[in-house]
Amino acid sequence: MSLFKRGDVWWSNLYKDGIRHQFSTGSSSHRQAETIEAKRKAELNNRRFQVVDVDPNITFGGVAARFVSSGSARPHHIYHLKFLLPCFSDIPVLRLTKSLAEDFRRARHSHNPAIKDATINRDLSVLRHVLYWAADEQLVTANPLARMKMARERRTRRQVLSLAEEQLLLPAAKDHLQGMIIAALDTGMRRGEITSQQWEDIDFSRKLLFVTRSKTPEGESREIPLTERLLKYLLQRRTPEGLIFSYKGRPLRIVKRTWKTALKNAKLRHVRFHDLRHTFNTRLMEAGVLQEVRMALMGHSPGSKVHATYTHIEFPVKREAIRKLEQWMKDQQKPTRKQRPKEKKDARTETDRSESGPPPDTGDEAGTQGVEEEIAR
């Protein structure tokens, strides 16, 4: 028998995966000990076959609260939950259906007709991610939206900053933003990577930058050679340790306001700060740098794991890519030095195509020459 008495208390012997487990029922009644033993057997059996006893009335709001409190939520999860919770908070998870997801999409479109399907897809992907997390944590038996399809996203043209616009933007930006712009244009780093960069991650003797914090695992621990322009900027502000880019000693996280101010002062069309990363990629492509090298510099994940196994970009190849980028920029600037006033006028014209407004004052030739020579250096 599995039950035996030790003193006045009944004990039980249970076997799980060939291993004997002995425990006390804490009862002197044989009938009660049998009931306790049967319950313990059922618990062990359910745990063995991953049978989950879930709350059928748990709502998405309750799941989201546990998801956030567990520490698994990333900043973009928190952002998209602000739009998901008003719609799904009080709905039990087992009642979530694809039709409710479509109702959410229509509600988002009716509230903001200009919103894109890609933005709503990001909302729904977070909804699905939270439900997958709940299934892994055995809060629900399965994800009811596991097979939900996203709307097809239309490809949009990516903005690229021209050299003429760059020469107008840099003098109009504040010092801390100016350094971030140079870093984004010359390294292709994301805004979060730039603001997290520290002086200890710069090897000035080798003219090398180490990305230690990135949005993706592929982006971390990558090496980026420094351009002469970025190296000169960093040497002028070099300190032993701490964040490279800060504002009045405080870390930088969001630069939307100062970025918009710089665009307004330079009288340029609307571009995002992230478009500087696209600009870096486009300039490398026009300079003749191969796609694999560009992906390695920017921290993109390779599309094929088999291809990635046999592709490793050595550091000299990266340094040669940055040299090609600098040479391309010099070649692009050579004809502009002969026609500086015309270049500035063309840059204003390009901006005016996107934003109607009065043509700005071009200024005298000496002032323009000073700005261009400072950037060229």
Image: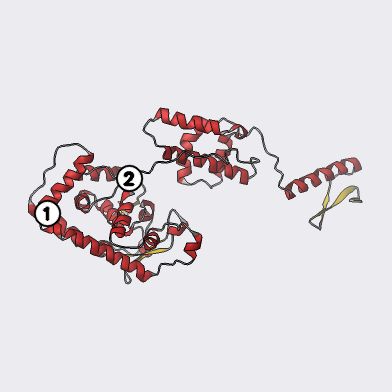
- How would you rate the neighbour count of disc 2 (Cα within 10 Å): few for under 14, some for 14-19, many for 20 or more? few
Q: 159 or 250: nearer the eye? A: 159
Which SS class for mark 1? helix
Q: Give me the C-alpha separation between circle 2 and circle 1.
A: 29 Å
Q: Quadrant of the C terminus?
A: bottom left
**Residue 161 in view in this figure:** yes
Give percent across and percent down for residue 12.
Answer: 86, 50
Q: Is residue 332 left or right of residue 3?
A: left
Q: Which residue is mark 1?
A: 340
Q: Residue at x 35, y 46 (%)?
A: 254
* Residue type highlighted by circle 1: Arg
Q: Is residue 339 left or right of residue 313?
A: left
Q: Which mark is residue 134?
A: none
Give percent across and percent down for residue 287.
Answer: 28, 61
Q: Are marks 2 and 1 in contact (CB under 8 Å)?
A: no
- How would you rate the neighbour count of disc 1 (Cα within 10 Å): few for under 14, some for 14-19, many for 20 or more? some
Give percent across and percent down for residue 39.
Answer: 81, 43
Q: Quadrant of residue 218?
A: bottom left
Q: Residue at x 48, y 43 (%)?
A: 77
Q: Is residue 66 left or right of residue 277?
A: right
* Residue type highlighted by circle 2: Arg
Give percent across and percent down for residue 105.
Answer: 47, 32
Q: Which residue is mark 2?
A: 157
Q: Quadrant of residue 109?
A: top left
Q: 28 or 287: nearer the eye? A: 287
**Residue 249 in view in this figure:** no
Q: Residue at x 41, y 28 (%)?
A: 111
Which SS class for mark 2? loop
Q: Residue at x 24, y 44 (%)?
A: 263
